[in-house]
């Protein structure tokens, strides 16, 4: 019961803030709604039992990447908003309609698969209530990262190094 | 079912009230200490030796006119102090004020939540506090607060790296991320981590000074710099929230350092039998004494050291603290593996 | 509504909704920064999927992959915003329809 209440409240917040992200006129408001969206997703991770990922989401995503976006938004001050002139080739209504149709189809598929096999549903929901494992979430993730997935871990660190060097190069003035 | 809810609510109420009241008295303590360092007396008029001064300050801030400039971004202007204060307050959920005590026949733990990722939770929540400063600078719709806000947030982000690396080296030493677990690890190992990791202590203290915008890193909010920094346009209760947030952050950093390095609520010298009478003092009194010492250290440094210039500050963070932190982390990991 | 237990399908529907919001953002908005933020919304929807399946199968690999997605998103944000700043210095515009320097 509590999980249901938490899920629906959080889902409403997440979707609501997501809509505000793409609908706000002022880009700074958009960024603030994105932060709130990410915080909602982090709480959702805690509900799902992935607390290490929730903290990493807050620390890296909401506290690092979105700060970067906020800095860029503030450093780029515009005299005229980019939405001021309408591009006649862009049909935004058609795009929104098609996306909504795809979403409706995906939801229909999910509802159909979840109701077509009732035995599977109860097994799934019973499994969804069990808490994964004994030694704690952080230890498990760390163990998996350093034993089974060591090579992707090292490659990710090289990727971040390359991204850092690239970003520094881009930010330098051509002098 | 209802019994499991009452205890945390009572704990939250007690901790919140204690923090909010002690923040106002830390302001008085700061004024008194700085005054004594400068051979003056500090606030003396209100109450005996100025002890009722915080009440006067709180009343003044609450009753002051709330001046909101016309062309500010209103939702963000109101949201910024909230986004600065709330992370500072919710960090207290994982700081252990003591072990377990028995009150009215119930076993009451003196911490609100023993999360098994407590230290990481503190770091992540502190990184949300940056938004309060950036949004305050932006929403004020004025040059000086904007620049000051961007500078302050750049400073906070830079020092976050060194602080996080030092916290990781403490985690390597203690073997657990939980704050209560780190306190207990110091009990079992018999020696406080301040003696095992002195470099981490120094780097974390300097980083903590920078993270809370305290002297000598208070470029962002000093009156002589950029006419008051990111909270120039704030007055009355909104300014009070920023003020509260800064001093609450100070208490958080002191609490974290006490728990990580000085044993939290444990007594000093547990293995010297002659001093075992210290065990009669309850744990939370030790905690408060140690936190008070760190707060005094913060204020003492403010009264003594001159302010860093911005480029000196950034150079210290990136070119000095981060290499030192990296080396310390590597050495800690190697020593831990060799043990 | 409170009698239906929360199955992973609920999380999949939420992730699909978030993903669609990101797609709509990419299609509708012309400010490049909002475009990037919609891409971040899509990445988060994918992460939510991974974590929901990790909970379903009781295996931690979903969370590990979500961690890698966050790392890649950080790298992409850094480089993408660097490119955006370099472009803005040249053309003084953030409209994605004006990014047509290579058009013949």
Image (cartoon, helix red, strand yellow):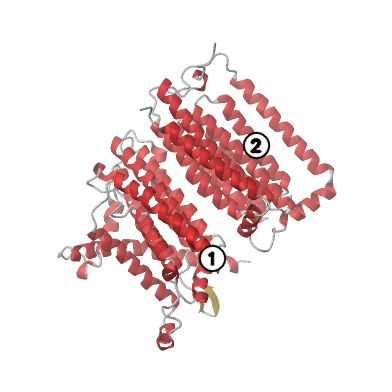
Compared to residue B141, the image places residue C64 above or below, namely below
- Residue B113 position, x and y percent, is 53, 64
Residue matched to label 1: B336
Element class at badge 2 = helix
Q: Residue at x 44, y 83 (%)?
A: B279
Q: How many marks?
A: 2
Residue matched to label 2: C17
Note whether residue C3 is visible: no
Quadrant of the rendered structure where residue B328 is? bottom left
Q: A90 and C59: which one is in front?
A: C59
- Residue B323 position, x and y percent, is 42, 52
Q: Is residue A135 left or right of residue B257?
A: right
Element class at badge 1 = helix
Compared to residue B223, the image places residue A107 above or below, namely above
Q: Is residue C51 left or right of residue B106?
A: right
Q: Label 2 crowding class (10 Å Cα cut-off): few <14, some 14-19, many 20+?
A: many
* CA–CA distance in space, label 1 to label 2: 47 Å
Note whether residue B296 is visible: yes
Q: Chain of mark 1?
A: B
Q: Residue at x 80, y 38 (%)?
A: A112
Compared to residue B151, the image places residue B271 above or below, namely below
């Amino acid at each position: 019961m509590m999980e249901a209440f938490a899920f629906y409240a959080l889902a409403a917040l997440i979707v609501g803030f997501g809509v505000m992200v793409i609908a706000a006129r002022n880009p700074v408001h958009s960024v603030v709604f994105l932060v709130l969206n990410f915080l909602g997703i982090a709480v959702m991770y805690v509900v799902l039992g992935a607390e290490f990922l929730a903290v990493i989401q807050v620390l890296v995503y909401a506290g690092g990447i979105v700060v970067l976006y906020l800095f860029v938004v503030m450093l780029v001050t515009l005299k005229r908003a980019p939405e001021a002139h309408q591009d006649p080739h862009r049909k935004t209504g058609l795009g929104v309609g098609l996306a909504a149709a795809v979403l409706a189809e995906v939801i229909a598929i999910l509802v159909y698969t979840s109701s077509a096999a009732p035995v599977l549903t109860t097994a799934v929901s019973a499994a969804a209530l069990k808490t994964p494992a004994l030694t704690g979430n952080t230890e498990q993730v760390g163990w998996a990262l350093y034993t089974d997935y060591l090579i992707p871990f090292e490659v990710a660190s090289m990727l971040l190094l390359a991204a850092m060097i690239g970003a520094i190069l881009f930010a330098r003035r051509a002098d | 079912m209802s019994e499991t809810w009452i205890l945390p609510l009572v704990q939250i109420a007690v901790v919140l009230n204690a923090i909010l009241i002690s923040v106002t008295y830390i302001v008085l303590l700061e004024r008194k200490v700085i005054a004594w360092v400068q051979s003056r007396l500090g606030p003396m008029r209100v109450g005996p030796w100025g002890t009722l001064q915080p009440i006067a300050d709180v009343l003044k801030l609450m009753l002051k006119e709330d001046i909101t400039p016309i062309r500010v971004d209103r939702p963000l202007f109101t949201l910024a102090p909230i986004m600065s204060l709330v992370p500072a307050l919710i960090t207290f959920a994982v700081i252990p004020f003591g072990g377990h005590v028995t009150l009215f026949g119930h076993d009451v733990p003196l911490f609100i939540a023993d999360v098994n990722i407590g230290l990481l939770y503190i770091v992540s929540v502190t990184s949300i506090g940056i938004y309060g400063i950036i949004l305050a600078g932006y929403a004020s719709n004025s040059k000086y607060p904007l620049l000051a806000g961007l500078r302050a947030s750049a400073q906070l982000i830079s020092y976050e790296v060194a602080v996080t690396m030092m916290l990781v080296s403490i985690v390597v030493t203690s073997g657990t991320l939980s704050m209560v677990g780190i306190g207990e690890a110091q009990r079992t190992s018999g020696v406080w981590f301040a003696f095992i990791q002195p470099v981490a202590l120094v780097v974390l203290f300097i980083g903590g000074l920078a993270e809370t915008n305290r002297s000598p890193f208070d470029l962002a909010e000093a009156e002589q710099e950029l006419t008051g920094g990111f909270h120039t346009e704030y007055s009355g209760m909104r300014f009070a929230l920023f003020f509260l947030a800064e001093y609450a952050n100070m208490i958080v950093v002191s609490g974290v350092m006490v728990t990580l390095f000085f044993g939290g609520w444990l007594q000093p010298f547990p293995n010297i039998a002659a001093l075992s009478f210290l065990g009669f003092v309850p744990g939370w009194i030790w905690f408060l004494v140690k936190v008070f010492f760190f707060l005094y250290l913060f204020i003492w440094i403010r009264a003594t050291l001159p302010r860093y210039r911005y480029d000196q500050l950034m150079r210290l963070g990136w070119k000095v603290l981060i290499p030192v932190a990296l080396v310390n982390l590597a050495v800690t990991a190697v020593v831990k593996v060799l043990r | 509504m409170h009698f239906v237990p929360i199955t992973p399908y609920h999380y999949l529907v939420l992730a699909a909704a978030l993903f669609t919001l990101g797609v709509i953002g990419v299609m509708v908005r012309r400010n490049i920064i909002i475009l990037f933020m919609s891409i971040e919304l899509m990445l988060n929807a994918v992460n939510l999927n991974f974590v929901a399946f990790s909970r379903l199968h009781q295996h931690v690999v979903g969370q590990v992959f979500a961690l890698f997605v966050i790392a890649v998103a950080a790298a992409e944000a850094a480089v993408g915003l660097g490119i955006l700043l370099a472009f803005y210095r040249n053309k003084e515009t953030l409209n994605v329809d004006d990014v047509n320097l290579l058009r013949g």
